[in-house]
Amino acid sequence: MPAQTVAEAKSNSSAVIKVDVERVNGDINDFIYSGFAEHMGRCIYGGIVDYDNKHGLINEKGHRTDVMEALKNMKMPLVRYPGGNFCAQYHWLDGVGPKEKRPTRPDLAWKNDETNLFGTDEFMEWCEEMGCEPYLCFNMGTGTLEEALAWVEYCNLDGDSYYAKLRRQNGRLKPYNVKYWGLGNEIWGEDQVEHLNAGDYAKRAINWAKALKRLDPSIVLVGCNYTGFDKWDIEVTPKLIKEVHHYSIHLYSSSDDYYKNVTAPAAAEIGIEILAKLIDLAKITEDAPNSKAKICFDEWNVWNPPHAQGDLGAEQKYDLSDALAVGSWLNVFVRQAEHLFMANIAQIVNVISPILTKPTGMVLQTTYYPFVLFSEHMRGRSLNLHVTTPLYKGETEGFEGTQHWLQAVDPHIVMLDVSATINGSKLTIAVVNRSLEDDITTSFAFNGKFSISTVKVWTIYDEDVTKANTFEEAFAVVPKESETTFEDVRDKGYSFPKHSFSMLQFSVEND
Ligand code: AHR
């Protein structure tokens, strides 16, 4: 069934959201609120760690404590590492052992020198302190299967083998038991170090998967798909169905045009829907009915490279319109939760990130706040809604001029972009009103036992949609909390302000 049905509203005062507590799309895996950290720009050095910080912002391990606190509020259960494009030429052995002996290497992805002062053990230590799971991506560019096997052995084996001993020698006695491993990153990209075509990638990934699972049958392997809507996905999905546990896809969205920017995440929803069907098809054609494969959307975000070039560290500045786009991204993940194993915001600090640091402090960008609200309140189960809303009929665009096909493929690009969850006695509805000009007055039709009680409301809004949080004005755009009552919403509806993000939380009685 579709994750939501949509009808066109005739006016800005005739929108309707129909909520039925029994129409459940599926369980939400908490991993949809995961993150991604790459050796790129100032994500690791200057973000996660800041070894030379003289402003009291690091602990004894060099971790940025302000960043840790901000990330803890984002409640990320898992972080992917060490790349990204970086991992196609990263040799993990360079980043373990005594720091004075670690080599500095040229990084071919982002054209920096990599000091290797932060490596596997430092990442694991940081994850343990953060309380999140690690997810490591193999080097399938210049790396070998032997090197990948050695990494799993270093992280997960407990016996007397060479790399298990090396880990103990480096100070870590117990294995890390890293469960999640990615079979390469964006191998489809022609500018990747050691790019492969889909057929060659599939052959290589199958061989690697067989050997890696033989070494450690407990690991979960993620195959490298593309966007969900590429020919690569059509070819690779069936080939890998019997060997990988899940499939990774990536997509970024952005545009200088307001409407294109806030509607672009709809392309991600199409990618998820198509790949979910390709997985079903592969189960049939490859006779793999026992596969439990789902989608790992392990890189997503708003990224506008002309404003934040990769080689220059991609330090994108976000405004209110970008926060609305991120709200829409998260609505996609909640609606499509039944198909998702995880989703990872790229990246967690400084590089296209909601958190920007400098040596003396940090700023939480506009995009930080929808993520925190979703991660805090939108867990549990995803609800299937019926939404009557004005539609957006203009041109569309995804990343760097792509995805202009979106309007043609999705005839219901909504002005009111909505998702809803039920978690115990809390029913939470997230709404992005994408209209630049109009508040949208919405009535609600509820089915279920709703408590006659207050409804909590969080709103992210400013009259100026280009407003951003800066080091000078750090709290220009933050959520405002308010309350209304269930009776009011039921009887009079709710007016969603133009270009705003809102979250409404109701109480329901469970049987
Ligand atoms: O997150 C930045 C880059 O975007 C990653 O290195 C790559 O995988 C993607 O193209």
Image (cartoon, helix red, strand yellow):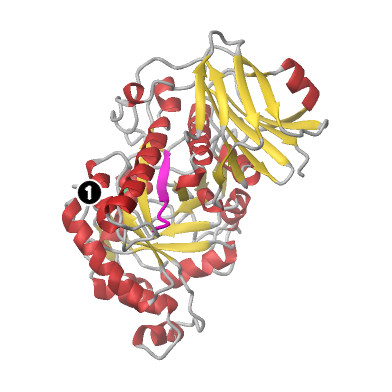
The reply, left or right, for residue 56 in relation to residue 209 is right
The reply, left or right, for residue 381 in relation to residue 250 is right
Element under disc 1: helix
Percent coordinates x, y for residue 390 in the rendering:
51, 15
Q: Which region shows up in magenta?
A: 291-301
Towards the viewer: 488 or 8 = 8
User: In which quadrant of the rendered view does residue 385 lie?
Assistant: top right
Q: Compared with residue 283, is residue 489 higher up or lower down, i.e. above or below?
A: above
Q: Compared with residue 189, is residue 438 higher up or lower down, i.e. above or below?
A: above
Residue most extreme to the right: 452
Instruction: Give the residue displayed 40% in from the left and 68% down from the top.
Output: 119
Percent coordinates x, y for residue 148 in the rendering:
30, 71
Instruction: Give the residue displayed 30% in from the left and 67% down from the top.
Output: 209
Residue most extreme to the bottom: 160
Query: Can residue 333 be spotted in the picture?
Result: yes
Neighbourhood count class around disc 1 (C-alpha, 10 Å): few under 14, some 14–19, many 20 upward: some
Q: Compared with residue 178, is residue 170 higher up or lower down, i.e. above or below?
A: below
Towards the viewer: 281 or 69 = 281
Towards the viewer: 245 or 448 = 448
Image mark count: 1
Q: Is mark 1 within 8 Å of ligand 1?
A: no
Instruction: Give the residue displayed 39% in from the left and 76% down from the top.
Output: 216
**Residue identified by numbered label 1:** 235
Percent coordinates x, y for residue 449 in the rendering:
76, 34
Query: Can residue 93 be spotted in the picture?
Result: no
Residue 447 lies in the magenta-colored region:
no
Residue type marked 1? Glu
